[in-house]
Amino acid sequence: MPETAPLAAATEADIPALAALHAEAFPPDERWGATAITTMLRLEGGFGFLAEGAGFILARAVAGEAEILTLAVRPTARRQGLGARLLEAAVAEAARRGASALFLEVSEANGPARALYARAGAAEVGRRRRYYADGTDALVLRIGPEG
Ligand SMILES: CC(C)(COP(=O)(O)OP(=O)(O)OC[C@H]1O[C@@H](n2cnc3c(N)ncnc32)[C@H](O)[C@@H]1OP(=O)(O)O)[C@@H](O)C(=O)NCCC(=O)NCCS
């Protein structure tokens, strides 16, 4: 069950599973293949958490700041608290790695993700006009003590 599924640190051995989950969670033109996921996981300070067969988050923490790279929950596992748990795990890991603020980008049109981030206390700190291929803006959000 997604609400109780254990979270494990994502490793390179999980890349095929992460790519499969990403493909289920995002529309075809936003999917990351195994190559993109490998690149993200290998970024300096990169880390992630996986709930097997249900969802995952990738993030990085460098020089006191962190960012969410992607968050994906399989459609059949949604609205059971997993996205919030993955986000919480990434926020805690970022803090453990010395990052006091965590940034992320979300499409203005992505209601579910915006609701999830708002509940986690995210504040809007910027906007990137027409950032996505469909012409929608990206909102830059910040989670952290001052934001
Ligand atoms: C966004 C996403 C990760 C949320 O995952 P999830 O496991 O369903 O989220 P949760 O069950 O933890 O939801 C936590 C809270 O967020 C809000 N929320 C989540 N989905 C929502 C929706 N469809 N509509 C309204 N609010 C929603 C609610 O407040 C929810 O709490 P509640 O269920 O008690 O009301 C998931 O919908 C997803 O993978 N979407 C496609 C990929 C994506 O957009 N990723 C984020 C890119 S920035």
Image (spheres, rainbow, N blue to C red):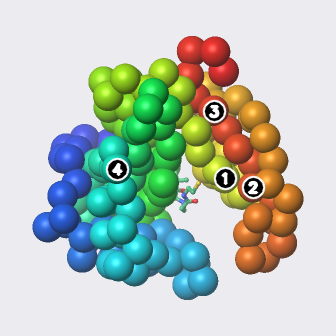
- Does the CB distance between marks 1 and 2 fall below 8 Å? yes
Q: Nearer the viewer, mark 1 or mark 4?
A: 4
What's under tag 3, amino acid-wise? Arg
Rounded to the nearest angstrom, the CA distance separating label 3 from label 2 is 13 Å
Return the residue nearer the eye: 99 or 135: 99
Residue at 48 percent across and 57 percent down: it is: 70
Query: Does 39 sit above or below residue 145?
Result: below
What's under tag 4, amino acid-wise? Glu
Which secondary structure lies at badge 2?
strand
Tell which circle, 1 or 4, labels the residue nearer the N-terminal end.
4
- Residue 68: tell me if it is visible: yes
In the rendered view, does 4 fall on the left or right side of 91? Answer: left
Which secondary structure lies at badge 3?
strand
Q: Is mark 1 within 8 Å of ligand 1?
A: yes
The residue carrying mark 4 is 44
What's under tag 2, amino acid-wise? Ala
Tell which circle, 4 or 3, labels the residue nearer the N-terminal end.
4
Could you classify mark 4 by the number of other residues whose Cα lies within 10 Å: few (under 14), some (14-19), or many (20 or more)? Answer: few
On residue 106, which mark appears? 1
- Does the CB distance between marks 3 and 1 fall below 8 Å? no
Could you classify mark 2 by the number of other residues whose Cα lies within 10 Å: few (under 14), some (14-19), or many (20 or more)? Answer: many
